[in-house]
Amino acid sequence: MDREDRNYQVKDTDHLLDYKTIFGNDNPVELEIGCGKGLFAREIAKKNPGINFLAVEKSSNVVVEAAEKAIEENIPNLIFLRGGAEYLDCYIPASSVDRIYLNFSCPYPKKSYASHRLTHRNFLEIYKKIMKKDAEIHQKTDNMHFFEFSIEEFSASDFYVKNVSLDLHSSEFKGNIMTEYEKRFSDQGFPIYRLEAIMKE
Ligand SMILES: C[S@@+](CC[C@H](N)C(=O)[O-])C[C@H]1O[C@@H](n2cnc3c(N)ncnc32)[C@H](O)[C@@H]1O
């Protein structure tokens, strides 16, 4: 369901997160959208204690499991949010996010579902509102068609893409953090596609 379907009108600032209150500091904020069970979010947060991470997931059951694991591991710079990416700009302050991670987002192969893909231009417009000027989107997927679609959408939405890899695990990229789906797909022998997208000035 998208914003139009629900005639979504709540846009007041009462809903905006106060990072200082939830994290207790002013460190940079990075976002993972569609975090699933949170393996990537936990690992990247542990490796980067000077960065605050918000992990967003629309499925309640999944995000509860992710949060329970993070509580067990006591990771102070990681917060989970249950919600759809459609509503990000209602609770994430404008121009406040340093980086967005889109890891193995659902590819929605049917053309009629293209607007649900998290790199559809409608979503990119929402991300632009919450991203800082020089912020980046880092995307990984196993799905070539979704990857191609994403590159087209980034280009149409005034992003340029760099560091494109068509086989991440055979590339020279250092410091990759695996996600649950990435493990599953690479164990099955699928290449992993990756890119970084940056807003044009
Ligand atoms: C294929 S899973 C990948 C999970 C994880 N990122 C990984 O790589 O293992 C995609 C996740 O995105 C979530 N998702 C799909 N559409 C979403 C949306 N509009 N907003 C937030 N989460 C979404 C799904 O519920 C699902 O958990």
Image (spheres, rainbow, N blue to C red):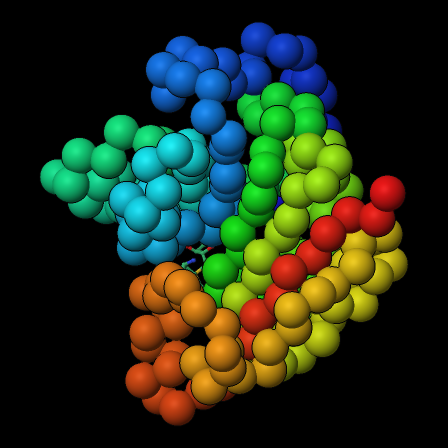
Q: Quadrant of the C terminus?
A: top right
Looking at the image, which is closer to me, 129 or 116? Answer: 129
Q: Quadrant of the N terminus?
A: top right
Looking at the image, which is closer to me, 83 or 134? Answer: 134
Across and down, in percent, residue 190 comes to: 45, 87
Residue 70 in the figure: left or right of residue 19:
left
Q: Residue at x 50, y 82 (%)?
A: 171
Q: Is residue 74 above or below residue 20?
A: below
Across and down, in percent, residue 38 comes to: 32, 50
Q: Is residue 26 visible to the viewer in this orientation of the structure?
A: yes
Q: Residue at x 53, y 52 (%)?
A: 101
Residue reaching furthest to the left: 72
Q: Is residue 117 above or below residue 41?
A: below
Q: Residue at x 59, y 82 (%)?
A: 166
Residue 77, image quadrant: top left
Across and down, in percent, residue 19 comes to: 47, 19
Residue reaching furthest to the top: 14
Across and down, in percent, residue 193 comes to: 56, 76
Residue 114, image quadrant: bottom right
Q: Is residue 90 above or below residue 127?
A: above
Looking at the image, which is closer to me, 80 or 197? Answer: 197
Q: Is residue 101 above or below residue 60?
A: below
Q: Residue at x 66, y 11 (%)?
A: 12
Q: Is residue 37 visible to the viewer in this orientation of the structure?
A: no
Residue reaching furthest to the bottom: 189
Q: Please state the total of marks drawn on the protein image.
A: 0
